[in-house]
Amino acid sequence: MTSTIFQDPSYEYRLNCDVLLVSNLYPPIQIGGYEIAAYDVAAGLIMNNMNVSVLTSDYRAQELSSTEPNVFRVLKLTSSWFGDYPVRNALQNMQYNLDTALDMIDRLQPKLVYAWNQANLGMGVLEAAVIKGVPILHHIMGVDLLSYRDEQPQSLRNRIMAALNRITSPQSRSLVLQERHLRNIIFLSHFMKVHYESQGVSPGFANVVYPGIAVERVRLKSDYRLTNKTVRVAYVGQLAPHKGVHHLKQALNEAKHKIDGFDIHLTLYGDGDPRFVQDLLSPSDIIIDHKGFCDREHLYNRLCDHDVGVFTSTWEEPFGIAQIELMAAGLPLLSSATGGAAEPVRHEVNALVYQSNDPHDLVDKFVSLVNDYETKAASMGKSARRMVEEAFNNKQMHQDILNIIKGIIQEPHRYV
């Protein structure tokens, strides 16, 4: 059974769209940087006179008071991140997404399916594009897609359900990632490109386009003095163990006893599992202020009020948009530089790099920065801002992506 969205007069949609952007989440419903970047790219394409429609999941869609033109929150998730989305049958949800995407493609007639984060969506939408002969362009900012190579249901019940689906639905296909789904890819970092190649993914078309931000909207720090005997530290991003924020709390508590007479005030911009967040906010020797998710206008105006930015991921980060936001504000940065997050940073030039998963090294780097703050901070902060202006700005990102999409649309037979 497919979505009845086109029978709902409250939805607005545009026939013959250029790009159908598909993402598991889409702002204002968001968890991390992947969906924020998708929103920014869609806005850039629209500004460049491309007709863009968005197909995303119904996760938390009930929180929105009205529908958005050309944004369809109708796909079903196959599992949830925080246990807050009931899934009775993941296989049926994948089939629903396939059928819904087929209907969507028939009605909108997109020239390109632009696939962003497909985690918890299954392969239905991508298979629909293959069936309809529409080129697929992946924008890969994570490793979740690789898990679909092994997603064939193994339990007896799921094997029976898959067989029944193939009998009862003429459009039912193998919903496992295959080479035909991965012909065209944009990677957000060289690290991710190398990682996918190491997993046997070598598409005919693969470019690296770094994420960009609206750097001109980020207020730049101008005063590099530690005032009121307080070091104000900013963390931006998801609050989760793999982001290393618990190591940050441990390190700052230790550092407080090594910088004589200074208080440490840590501000957390982001959210996560309530139990993990509650543990982070438990009493300690430092002051912790949890702001939750902030709209970027507010965030970009407030980051420069801090003295130090921290990027503490412990996993192999695909890139780390939060890191370049901190850099754009001119904050001296402490970075674990894992995975693709290493690509924007230069140790002792625009950041101090510490050993990931080693809170003691983070303590040492933090203390050395505080002790020489008025000597190091301004130079590092200005170098960081300059790096973002030159290499990680929205204008460059939008132009690079626009050129790629136009090339595919103009010669679709080369990319199907």
Image (cartoon, rainbow, N blue to C red):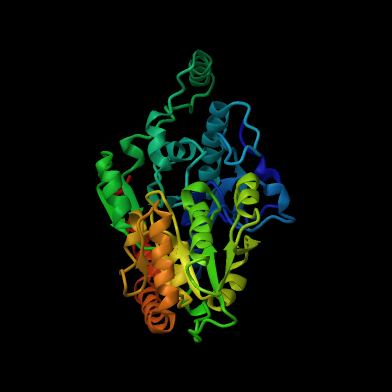
Q: Nearer the viewer, residue 128 or 310?
A: 310
| Residue 60, percent from left and from top | 67, 47
Measured along the vertical axis of the image, is residue 202 above or below residue 292?
above
| Residue 374, percent from left and from top | 43, 84
Q: Is residue 86 left or right of residue 16?
A: right
- Residue sitting at x 26%, y 49%: 194
| Residue 255, percent from left and from top | 48, 64
- Residue sitting at x 46%, y 57%: 18
- Residue sitting at x 63%, y 27%: 88
Q: Nearer the viewer, residue 208 or 257?
A: 257
Q: Is residue 412 visible?
A: no
Q: Quadrant of residue 337?
A: bottom left
Q: Is residue 188 left or right of residue 35?
A: left
| Residue 408, percent from left and from top | 34, 55
Q: Residue furthest right?
A: 65
Q: How many marks?
A: 0
Q: Is residue 275 visible?
A: yes
Q: Is residue 63 left or right of residue 120?
A: right
Measured along the vertical axis of the image, is residue 246 above or below residue 178?
below
Q: Nearer the viewer, residue 319 or 351?
A: 351
Q: Nearer the viewer, residue 381 or 8?
A: 381
